[in-house]
Image (cartoon, helix red, strand yellow):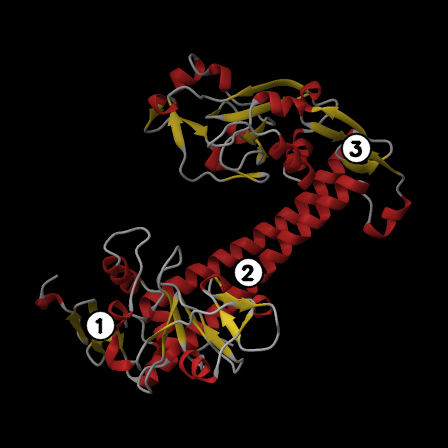
Amino acid sequence: MSNDDVLDGFKMTDIGFLPNEWEVTQLERFIESPQYGYTARAVESTEGPRYLRITDIQNGIVEWTKVPSCECDASAREKYGLQDGDIVVARIGATTGKSFIFRGSVDTLFASYLIRIRTKESLLPEFLHYFFDTRVYWNQIQKSKGGRLKGGISIPSLRNLVVPIPPLREQKRIATVLNSVQESKKRTDVVVNAAKELKKTLMKHLFTYGPVRMKDATNVELKETSIGQMPKHWKVIPCGELCEEVTVGIVVRPSSYYVVSGVPALRSLNVKEDSLDMSELVFVSEKDNSTRLAKSRLRKGDVLIVRTGYPGTSCVVPEDLEEANCIDLVVVRTRKEVLQSSFLSRYLNSQSGRRQVLANLTGMAQKHLNIGAVRRTLVPIPPLSEQIRIVEWLSVVDSAKKSAQVRANTADTLRRTLLDNLMTGRLRANNLEVPT
């Protein structure tokens, strides 16, 4: 885009088009002297200051109850102590470039793989923290790493970052809007995590006591089996005896069959716990699907089991994928009169099912699941009516979890869209009503 194309009120800068009244400058003008972290020995004692390490920061969150203390003298406290509003940036490792803003008054020192940044009054810490999540920032970080996957960053590279600096009032408005959206995302994440934990708890209950209310579990007569406790009237039978067929999808040069469009061919990355992810699909031709690849064609109700990567992860083939194909997946076709395919999938995704899968993996460098291991897997067999009720109970939780995940994804998309637009001035925060 030429200078003649610049929109009214915007100017071309080293980091793209920005509002005329924004400064574009190196970060060093707006920060105090950055500082590398303190090298100390973490201790279990509750005495002494907290010792914040790079591993304590997960997805921008610190679980302070797990942060250890450290031994230090007064000079170390003075030099490496964190103040309210300080930002620490990971300088090495898988999280290089990620930042965390310290809020509060907890006596805390930061460790050696972190760099502390303390802003001057003309730069709001929250604004800088949000800048550290933009594409403009990450493009500069990748450049400073020289394209090295495990490359680190240094104080000079942070000092030389080119940053947009709106007027302080607008910085505050941008931070307020993004804080509001961030809190909304945190709340949706809490709901998603709660739904996941609820499903784990419910699965353990259902595969131990059957489809009874938790308050009635003490009335269920149990028996001890090789795969754990279960109701006395249930059976334990190897999977191979419960199936019409156990086979495997295309394993020999599958990519040689790929076409631009045609019959979907499901891979490991498409199989999630009791669901399918239809992104990144590959296809085979209808001709190959009905001839050379006919052996691995799928039917509605088949159970798909991941062999490599996350072995044992299972789901059921839905009606709209009847006659689709699959690649390097174990395919189980159950005897419907004794075993519901949805029940088998649910069990394989349970803790008990996963334990058996992990115990039967083969291979040295890359572990994988073979057909023999699936056939030998012991499966609890309730009456069909109980299998159906167990699947129904878990489907209700899955529905709630899916709904919560949709809301979380929407909140994340909104956060990213607002971040990109507010931090470039395409959307002016001064004109926005901040949600409560």
Q: Residues within 10 Å of mark 2 (few under 14, many from 20)?
A: some
Q: Which mark is residue 296?
A: none
Give x and y (percent) for residue 254: 39, 23
Give x and y (percent) for residue 58: 49, 61
**Distance (Cα) linking label 3 and label 1:** 64 Å
- Amino acid residing under circle 3: Ser
CB under 8 Å between discs 1 and 2 = no
Helix or strand or loop: what does disc 3 sit on?
A: helix
Q: Residues within 10 Å of mark 3 (few under 14, many from 20)?
A: few
What residue does disc 1 label? 18
Give x and y (percent) for residue 31: 30, 80
**Distance (Cα) linking label 2 and label 3:** 35 Å
Residue 432 visible at all: no
Q: Is residue 413 above or below residue 224?
A: below
Q: Residue at x 71, y 41 (%)?
A: 392
Mark 3 or mark 1: name the one nearer the start of the chain. Answer: 1
Give x and y (percent) for residue 324: 48, 25
Quadrant placement of the N terminus? bottom left
**Distance (Cα) linking label 1 and label 2:** 33 Å
Mark 1 or mark 2: name the one nearer the start of the chain. Answer: 1
> Of circles 1 and 2, which is in front?
2
What residue does disc 2 label? 189
Q: Is residue 410 above or below residue 285?
A: below
- Amino acid residing under circle 2: Asp
What residue does disc 3 label? 385
Residue 414 visible at all: yes
